[in-house]
Image: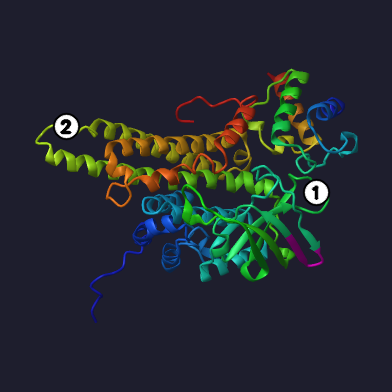
Amino acid sequence: MNETIRELLARVGGLPVAVTELEDAADLYSAGLSSFASVQLMLAIEEAFDIEFPDSLLNRKSFASISAIEQTVAQILKAREAA
Amino acid sequence: MSLPAFATDMTLGARARRVAEVAAENADRVDQEARFPAEAVDAMKAERLLGIQIPVSFGGEGASIPEIAEVCSILGQACAASAMVFAMHQIKVSSLVEHGGDSEWHRDFMRELCARQLLVASATTEGGIGGNLRNSICAIEIDGDICRLTKDATVISYGAHADVIMVTSRAHADATPGDQVMTVFKKNQYTLEKTVDWDTLGMRGTCSDGFIFKGEAPAVQIFPKPFAEIAAQSMLASSHLLWSAVWYGIAADAMLRAQAFVRAAARKANGAQPPGAVRLAEASNLLQLLKANILSGLKIYADAKADPDQLSSMAFSIAMNNVKLASSETILVIINQAMIICGIMGYKNGTPYSLGRHLRDAHSAQLMISNDRILGNTSTMMLVQKPDTSLLG
């Protein structure tokens, strides 16, 4: 999952730095993720994992870092399995 | 022992109305001369309105955003420029109240602001950023305990008249444009060199000149939180809500003038319906919609305040954007209706029904953060956000 997220981030994130240089916990907004790019990233993740982010997870915190995104996606996948 | 015959009414509403009286007296001159509404701001200080939002424990009155919005609308009915100065000051204070409580310097500063009734201005706009306050070019330089900042601030509303300026910048020399901090600079800690004159269609008294800002202050005056959080959690909501309250005030006064005009006509009409009467009914309908829009925004903010996640959610941003879009557009329709009702008496300056200043001031609303930018922002969020379509939720 980490790899897919990194690939998508590299494709749509428009970051001024290489994604390979980012730690999992690095703050993506400080790294230059714009709010427009963060939405593009959400759309790309929804498509790649065939999920939809519920409104409660559409906030800055859920997308603040690669590991935060992983947790957010994992939470949705887990909820789907349980359903 | 005898009680004084008249006890001064010290409720917030009464204090605001006393300031509004002073503001109304000077509104036309402030507008004509494009000068700072010094009399009204002095009256705000005398009524101790500048510190009302600060918690009681730091010397203020702990006034809520709805209470402050009410003051904005009372002042807006008298002089839009004075009301906007008050609103912009309170927006900066909201950042202090919401994000300064963890820092000793900012807590002391809140006490000082209340005691000395300091007027706070904002320097978020910068030459070259294209109007997006969430980007900075300038960077703050931290040298031991001291920070230094130079900013080409193309707009600092009432900058020359403020006691304090809060300035955004990149967090350090290598930070990306969106990695910002905000720093409090007091009057003796900066210089302003005027670069641009504020000679505008309306809101002339806000004196939003451009300056080269140069400041040096202890580094503890930098807000301890990233500006991104401050912008999302206190500035976005307080700006859109308090501006809207000012605009509501402008529209409400325009409607009152139109109503006075129709009444005067009705008294002379011997029972016939005066021509503007139906339009007045329409304007009253729109004014109520505008009021409902602002009240619903104030409630959404009050509910979201309890939960930081909600404050930074897309649903909340969209709701605040929508309040701003609707208020800034509706006021123009209302004032235009009022102008048609009052006819030449509304179009002329210096009559009891004059509406030129109202109309010119109101035109700033769509541009203070361009509505096109806000629509673009909302449309991006709508690509992923799922609206709550319940009526009460």
In the image, B216 versus B276, the foreground residue is B276
On screen, B204 above or below A35?
below
At 80% from the left edge and 48% from the top edge, which residue is drawn? B175
On screen, A13 above or below A77?
below
At 45% from the left edge and 66% from the top edge, which residue is drawn? B45
At 54% from the left edge and 47% from the top edge, which residue is drawn? B239
Q: Position of residue A34 (x, y in %)?
A: 73, 37
Q: Position of residue B162 (x, y in %)?
A: 56, 64
Q: Position of residue B167 (x, y in %)?
A: 66, 56
Label 1 crowd (10 A; few <14 / some 14-19 / many >=20): some
Is residue B295 on the magenta stretch? Answer: no
Q: Which residue lies furthest to the bottom in this view?
A: B1
In the image, B357 versus B124, the foreground residue is B357
On screen, A12 above or below B29?
above
Residue B14 appears in view: no
| Label ID, residue B175 | 1
Q: Position of residue B121 (x, y in %)?
A: 57, 58
Which segment did they paint magenta?
A: B143-149
On screen, B174 above or below B268?
below
Instruction: Name the amino acid, label 2.
Output: Gln
Q: How far apart are marks 1 and 2 (CA)?
A: 66 Å
- Is residue B305 toward the left or the right of residue A81 in the image? left
- Is residue B289 toward the left or the right of residue B197 in the image? left
Parent chain of label 2: B
| Label ID, residue B273 | 2
Parent chain of label 1: B
Query: In the figure, residue B374 lies in which quadrant?
Result: top right
Instruction: Name the amino acid, label 1.
Output: Ala
In the image, B1 versus B89, the foreground residue is B89
**Nearer the camera: disc 1 or disc 2:** 2
Q: Could you tell which of marks 1 and 2 lies nearer the N-terminus?
A: 1
Residue A16 appears in view: yes
